[in-house]
Amino acid sequence: GENVEQHPSTLSVQEGDSAVIKCTYSDSASNYFPWYKQELGKRPQLIIDIRSNVGEKKDQRIAVTLNKTAKHFSLHITETQPEDSAVYFCAATSFGNEKLTFGTGTRLTIIP
Amino acid sequence: DTGVSQDPRHKITKRGQNVTFRCDPISEHNRLYWYRQTLGQGPEFLTYFQNEAQLEKSRLLSDRFSAERPKGSFSTLEIQRTEQGDSAMYLCASSLLSQEQYFGPGTRLTVT
């Protein structure tokens, strides 16, 4: 089955700086890669996703890149703000598989 | 609120008791998923439904666990003879056809 590894497990950045979280996956059939943000005690919230037919996707301060050959994808947050502090999870799945396989999460702390 | 809802939000039970959780998906979403999340980990897939049909079950789902979605709308997850190792956050998610899964707030189960 699919295995997703996520790094780093914790990340602290100064407000206004950029943050990068990286994930690798094992199943070459995986074609959908979402990112979720989970604040303490709240539901995982889908913030951005990418499909295997594109290499990059942006949404305001958030971007995701995908390297299918190397089987890794990354989340980039620019101009970080205190409200970006949360745990971020990457995930992967393939068409027809349906279940998401999650990474172990990255606790991002934005230092004011 | 038109998002995924779950009930109850918190459940404390004694070991050996049975518990049942409910999930109401986003209306018109035909796919419904159950995940389990323990502290410091990403959600782990348990099972999923397309309409009323249960199409996949994880090996994490022992015979003490049963899930139903009788009319293709809400779903219930029952755990019989609870054990302390069942203590976790139980998350429900729903999707239409695009692989994008939207999560509910979860039910936090504590088995004493």
Image (cartoon, coloured by chain):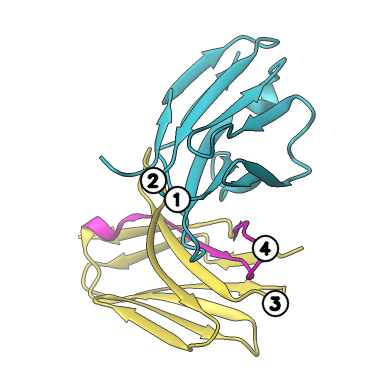
Chain colours: A yellow, B cyan
Q: Amino acid at mark 3?
A: Ala
On-image quarter of the C terminus of chain A: bottom left
Indicate the secondary structure of the residue bearing disc 3: loop
| Front in this rendered view, residue B55 or A23 | B55
Label ID, residue B17: none
Contact flag, marks 1 and 3 (Cβ < 8 Å): no
Residue at horizontal 44%, vertical 22%? B10
Q: Amino acid at mark 4?
A: Asn
Confirm whether the magenta stretch covers residue A91: yes
Q: Which residue is mark 2?
A: B26
Contact flag, marks 4 and 3 (Cβ < 8 Å): yes
Residue at horizontal 48%, vertical 88%? A54
Q: Which residue is mark 4?
A: A97
The residue stretch that appears in magenta: A83-101
Confirm whether the magenta stretch covers residue A19: no
Q: Which residue is mark 3?
A: A29
Q: Along the horizontal axis of the image, is B72 left or right of A29?
A: left
Q: CA distance from mark 1 to mark 3?
A: 25 Å
Label ID, residue B29: 1
Q: Amino acid at mark 1?
A: His
Q: Along the horizontal axis of the image, is B106 left or right of A26?
A: left
Q: Chain of mark 1?
A: B
